[in-house]
Image (cartoon, rainbow, N blue to C red):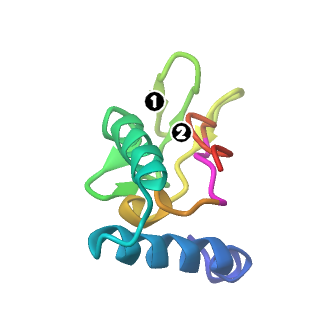
Amino acid sequence: MSLKNIYKSRSEILDGHLNELRTVTGLASKDEVAIFSVREKICSSCPLKSGNSCNSKKWMHPKTLEISNNPKEGFVRGCGCRLSAKQKSKHSVCPAKLWGNEF
């Protein structure tokens, strides 16, 4: 993720990290934890997931889950985000639209 994108996404990034902390300390609501858990399950089965990140060096077709090392029509690029925080940002959306806007 470029510095420009980080700056533009700073509120989402901060929200994700704060909610990550709230979850670990037991301060997140049961509804929030349930949504975060669903997001985590989706990401865990996503072919763009690499460790704790969404691989920004790969592209994926959101319907077929086909992976490419190069851009292709209808494919989306991995965002490069640290997933354990992004999954907990209420304002974030998966680049493939597999989750987001639940809040």
**Residue at the image point whose x is 50% and y is 70% from the top:** 16
Say if mark 1 contacts mark 2, CB within 8 Å: yes
Where does the image place residue 44, in percent across and percent down from the top left? 31, 40
Label annotation for residue 43: none
Secondary structure beneath dot 1 equals strand
Left or right of 51 in this view: 42: right
Mark 1 or mark 2: name the one nearer the start of the chain: 2
Residue at the disc numbered 2: 59
Secondary structure beneath dot 2 equals strand
- Of 71 and 25, which appears nearest the observer? 25
From what the image shows, is residue 23 above or below residue 38? below
**Residue at the image point whose x is 52% and y is 49% from the top:** 78
**Residue at the image point whose x is 36% and y is 77% from the top:** 21
Please name the predominant secondary structure of the magenta segment in the image: loop
Screen quadrant of the N terminus: bottom right
From what the image shows, is residue 82 above or below residue 9? above
| Kind of residue sitting beneath label 2 | Trp
Instruction: Give residue 42's quadrant in the image.
Output: top left
Where does the image place residue 28, in percent across and percent down from the top left? 42, 66
- On whether residue 24 falls in the magenta region, the answer is no
Give the residues drawn in magenta, as a range: 91-95
Residue at the disc numbered 1: 67
- On whether residue 93 falls in the magenta region, the answer is yes
> Distance between the Cα atoms at labels 1 and 2?
6 Å
